[in-house]
Image (cartoon, rainbow, N blue to C red):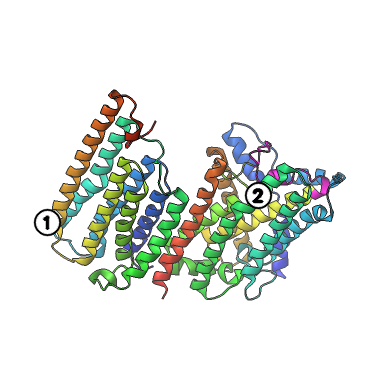
Amino acid sequence: MTHLVDIILSFVLLSIIFSFGSSRLQGLIKALAFQGVVVSIVPFFIGHDITEGGVLFSLTTLLIRGIAIPFYIYRFIEKVAAHRELEPIIGYNGSIFTGLLLIVAAMAVSRKFSVPSASTSLLLLPTAISLLVGGMFLLMARRKAITMILGYITMENGIYLVGTTFSVRAHHIVEFGILLDVLAGVMIMAVILQNIKLKMQSGGEDTSLNIISKE
Amino acid sequence: MTPIIIFIPAILSAPFFPAIILKVKAFFGGKKGPPLLIQYYTLAKLFKKGSVYSTSTTYIFKLGPMVSLSAALTALMFLPISGAAPLFSFKGDVLFVLYLLGLGRFFTIAAALDTASPFEGMGAAREAYFPIICEATTFMIFILFYRLTGELTLASFFYGNHPLELWRVAGAPLAFVVTAFFIVLLTENARVPVDDPATHLELTMIHEVMVLDHSGPDFGFIEMGSFCKLFFYAAIVSRLVFPFDLGHPAMNLAAFSLIMLLIYAAVGVIESVMARYRMDRVPKFVLTSFALAFVATIITLEFVK
């Protein structure tokens, strides 16, 4: 354990397991925010991007990915009071085990790649792959739409980290464009979900439509 | 000579520390709490009494408390308490100690089943279920330590400043290991949030329900055995939390006692601020410790190649 970034990334790996085992939306969002913050500060630790533009982009990413998006979703959940259980398709214990297997697989797969950053941090690519696949798993294994959004954002964090890993310079413009898309996507999804919620409340009991929450 | 000088006071002080937990809990409840020597009084009271045996029990029932106490005592003999050399040590004693603790548990369960009481069977089923996951965690942790040190003795992990070496090689993952081991400590010793040692409602108890039929000296053995077991786990955690060797046995012992007090106080704080988990939530909690140990192992294996 030599590099500081590896210590932080090992906590990200842990937060993936935590988000798999968490039965509450709040816990999931906190894990997400943590992942967002770490993912956006990783470039500093690897040592590239210490230009003015790079710092500015990274800080903006931190602001949006680590604070704005989680805060927005948190607010949304408070508003529609959807903080009950997540109704998993795959149970929490099963999910934790899947998460462990997933990390092992990510470790195994990442050895096959030869990436420029492997010399500085051993955990970078495994964490990126784990986030990517873990996000996909959350998308599949949870029933509610709000959890799917969270899974999607986890996946996006993973994609960003893969980007950091593979390209050593000048990936900001593309990443930033994607980030803005994600922000817009989250907002649109929130609005849609809110409307569905309102429709459901006024439209009587259509229980087959309980995609947000079942009180 | 030093191992014995340290071992005997360690055993004698084992009933002292749980009183700290009671004191901390009383403090949180705004009460005065029992005296610090309460467990000694309890043991003395129990050993003065006679035993009552149900007619449905056999010799297994009488064997249970003795085996569980001696298993815990023997396990302590292999542990480098406060970093001093242990009484015994041989290659592979880690496995021996783990199975020794398993043997103690087996006999507690067997004695509980021997009473032919449905309540005790229920407790036995739970006692058998949760520690299985704990064992997986402990094995995972020792596999990690084996990878780091290349040896398979408790002494090579916890003697002197060897834990410092573990920290130096493994770094942050060892913090996961400490957390995982603390969860194992709580589960194995039937503390909150897995089990509530204060409750006396049969439906919610795990460990307490199995020892309902024991009385007098037998119950004293069981109590003493559980104090020793708690001491064993707390001593390991304290070695991991405070991995330094101060140079002099007396100073090591002082530091060790202080850390032990803090660990027991931490258990007390957890018992005060947390409620017991619902029975079906417990496996997830214990599984968390396994996940922690597992992640720590995978990450560390990536570095130690």
Q: Is residue A73 left or right of residue A184?
A: right
In terms of secondary structure, where does tag 1 sit?
helix
Which one is nearer the viewer's eye here, A50 or B130? B130
Q: Residue at x 65, y 50 (%)?
A: B127
Q: Is residue B41 left or right of residue A107?
A: right
- Mark 1 belongs to chain: A
Assign the magenta stretch its main secondary structure.
loop
| Residue B87 at x, y percent in the picture | 70, 69
Q: CA distance from mark 2 to mark 1?
A: 59 Å
A47 versus A93 height, above or below: below
B292 versus A188 height, above or below: below
Question: Which residues, given as a range, are shown in magenta?
Answer: B197-218
Say if the magenta span includes residue B288: no
Say if the magenta span includes residue B199: yes
Name which quarter of the figure residue B250 lies in: bottom right
Task: Identify the amino acid type marked 1.
Answer: Ile
Task: Identify the amino acid type marked 2.
Answer: Ala
| Residue B107 at x, y percent in the picture | 74, 56
Give the labeled residue for mark 2. B125
Q: Is residue B37 visible?
A: no
Q: Residue at x 21, y 46 (%)?
A: A64
Give the labeled residue for mark 1. A173
Which one is nearer the viewer's eye here, A44 or A101? A101
| Residue A21 at x, y percent in the picture | 43, 49
Name which quarter of the figure residue B8 lies in: bottom right
Which one is nearer the viewer's eye here, A18 or B169? A18
Q: Is residue B275 visible?
A: yes
Mark 1, other Cα within 10 Å: few <14 / some 14–19 / many ≥20: few
In terms of secondary structure, where does tag 2 sit?
helix
* Same chain check for tags 2 and 1: no
Q: Is residue A106 left or right of residue B178?
A: left
